[in-house]
């Protein structure tokens, strides 16, 4: 269940970013590209996390909890920043999708369900990015700030819950 919720919430950072894009003509294409990247990077991250798990064994769980906690903090700290979007949206989708690699690396070290996370990350990214692009004409900076805060808080809570299960 944790994999599905976290995977779906990984699209929140993209939503916070895409809601600030003023005019995107090919919303469906950009949302699809973002969803693909939100599935590709975790696929790679899970495999690397599994490899790291075999080397670290018991310490891998602690490392993954630290990764998740730090990513959550990064979301919280970046919520108040005003992004200056000057790069093409397709490249922006790549940079916004890179954080899914870190989260999936952590999940790979925790030996969680790979396919559940990857599918939910793709679906979540698609739905949330398309929704954000649709609303981007009326959205303000404040909406993006709240989305980042929610995503950061959820990742921190998941990292704490994972730590308590170790």
Image: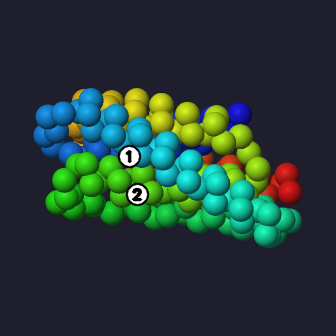
Q: Is residue 156 in view from this perspective?
A: no
In front here: 48 or 158?
48
Residue in the picture at 33% in, 49% down:
93
Say which residue label 1 marks.
14
Callout 2: 10 Å neighbours few (<14), some, many (20+)? Answer: many
Q: Where is residue 55 in the image (x, y as percent from the top left)?
A: 79, 69
Q: Is residue 136 in view from this perspective?
A: yes
In front here: 48 or 27?
48
Q: In the rendered view, would you say 87 is above or below 135?
A: below
- Occupied quadrant, residue 86: bottom left
C-beta proximity under 8 Å, tags 1 and 2: no
Q: Position of residue 96 (x, y in %)?
A: 38, 53
Residue in the picture at 25% in, 48% down:
90
At mark 2, the secondary structure is loop
* Left or right for 70, reference 40: right
**Which color scheme did the rendering employ for the protein?**
rainbow
Residue in the picture at 49% in, 64% down:
74
Q: Position of residue 13 (x, y in %)?
A: 42, 48
Q: Which of the two labelled residues, at mark 1 and mark 2, occupies the earlier sequence position? A: 1
Callout 1: 10 Å neighbours few (<14), some, many (20+)? Answer: many
In front here: 85 or 79?
85
Say which residue label 2 marks.
79
Residue in the picture at 40% in, 57% down:
79
* Left or right for 108, reference 17: right
């Amino acid at each position: 269940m944790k994999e599905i919720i976290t995977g779906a919430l990984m699209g929140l950072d993209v939503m916070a970013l895409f809601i600030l894009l003023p005019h995107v003509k090919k919303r469906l294409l950009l949302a699809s590209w973002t969803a693909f990247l939100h599935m590709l990077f975790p696929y790679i991250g899970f495999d690397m996390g599994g490899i790291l798990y075999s080397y670290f064994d018991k310490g891998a769980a602690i490392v993954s909890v630290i990764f998740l906690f730090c990513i959550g903090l990064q979301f919280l700290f970046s919520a108040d920043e005003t992004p200056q979007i000057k790069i093409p949206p397709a490249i922006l989708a790549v940079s916004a999708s890179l954080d899914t690699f870190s989260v999936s690396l952590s999940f790979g070290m925790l030996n969680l369900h790979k396919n559940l996370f990857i599918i939910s990350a793709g679906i979540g990214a698609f739905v949330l990015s398309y929704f954000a692009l649709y609303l981007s004409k009326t959205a303000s900076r404040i909406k993006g700030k709240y989305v980042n805060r929610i995503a950061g808080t959820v990742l921190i809570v998941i990292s704490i819950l994972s730590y308590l299960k170790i």
